[in-house]
Image (cartoon, rainbow, N blue to C red):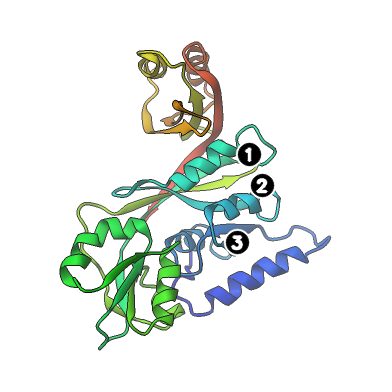
Amino acid sequence: MSTDAGDPGAARRDEAAAAAAGGAGEAAAPRPLVAYFGRPGTFSHEVASRRFGQSADLAPRRTISEVFDAVAAGAATYGVVPIENAVGGPIYDTVDQLIRREGTGAALVVCEELSLHVTLSLLGRRGVTPKRIYSHFVPLKHCGDWLRQSYPDAQILEAESTAEAVERAAQDGEAWAIGNKGAAAIYKLEVLVPKLGVKGENITRFFIVGRAEEPPTSGGRTLLLFGLDHRPGALVSALSALGRHHINLTRIVSRALPDSPEEYLFLVECEGSTSEPAFQEALALLQQHATGVRSLGSFRVSQKYE
């Protein structure tokens, strides 16, 4: 599949596709529209491009919330959002959108999980001593120490996304940015350092969210959401219910309830599908130890893009 991440016309094509989708009218079998977080040149844009290729139109959205809004309203068929980075940890904006929308008319489910081996690049203009260096908070966690060591006099500033960071650097003659090297062509900057060294593998995982489940015929994973009574051993009892049926956990994230900060909701990703009898038995047992147990989708786990 082709990728538009390094194409200078990607921004114009993505915006045109979004506008065209609104005027399709009664056209038969319209192309699906895929909303993604950030601007052309982000890693979300790269993943959306590589996953859907020429089979869908891509539409950038400024925030993760706007991606969810587009899919929930039917303006987009799917949304592509990051869920976790190997070093930065969970992307809590995505976690919170999944949790807050559950039980409402705007609830979405996970349809697929993808991952990308992220290569971070330093972008800017040669011959300039940077006074400011922009990036998203996750790359800054990877490269912050190196930046402070290499450019001690530069301000390290956080942006909404890596593409926004690159755009700011393009508009600021004394700034550089860390982001996707494909963004350099879009924003007319140079790739100063093609690959910044980071500790360990820099993997970012993404969810494709939609309005209806698309469970795999076998295998895959399921995302569960539940609460717990405020008592000793409650979490151990809940997870043991899954363990008794040999359900392997792959991710667990907790979030305090806004109106009751001592109570938590748990977002648990595990292997298996709600269509499998053994998984259904595990859920029945989990319901005896947890409150409000519900599935946010059984989904396939697809390839890792290098």
The residue that appears at 45% across and 63% down in the rendered structure is 46
Amino acid type for the residue under numbered disc 1: Ala
The residue that appears at 72% across and 69% down in the rendered structure is 20
What is the distance, in whole Å, between disc 2 and disc 1 at their CAs? 7 Å
Residue closer to the observer: 93 or 49: 93
**In the picture provided, is 268 more to the left or to the right than 203?**
right
Q: Which quadrant of the structure image shows residue 296?
A: top right
Kindly check if marks 1 and 3 are in contact, taking CB atoms under 8 A apart as contact.
no
Whole-percent x and y of residue 74?
A: 71, 51
Whole-percent x and y of residue 13?
A: 60, 74
Kindly check if marks 2 and 3 are in contact, taking CB atoms under 8 A apart as contact.
no
**What residue did someone put label 3 on?**
55
What is the distance, in whole Å, between disc 1 and disc 3 at their CAs? 25 Å
* Mark 2: secondary structure: helix
Residue closer to the observer: 238 or 146: 146
The residue that appears at 66% across and 47% down in the rendered structure is 72
Crowd rating for badge 2 (residues with CA inside 10 Å; few <14, some 14–19, many 20+): many
Q: Quadrant of the C terminus?
A: bottom left
**What residue did someone put label 2 on?**
72
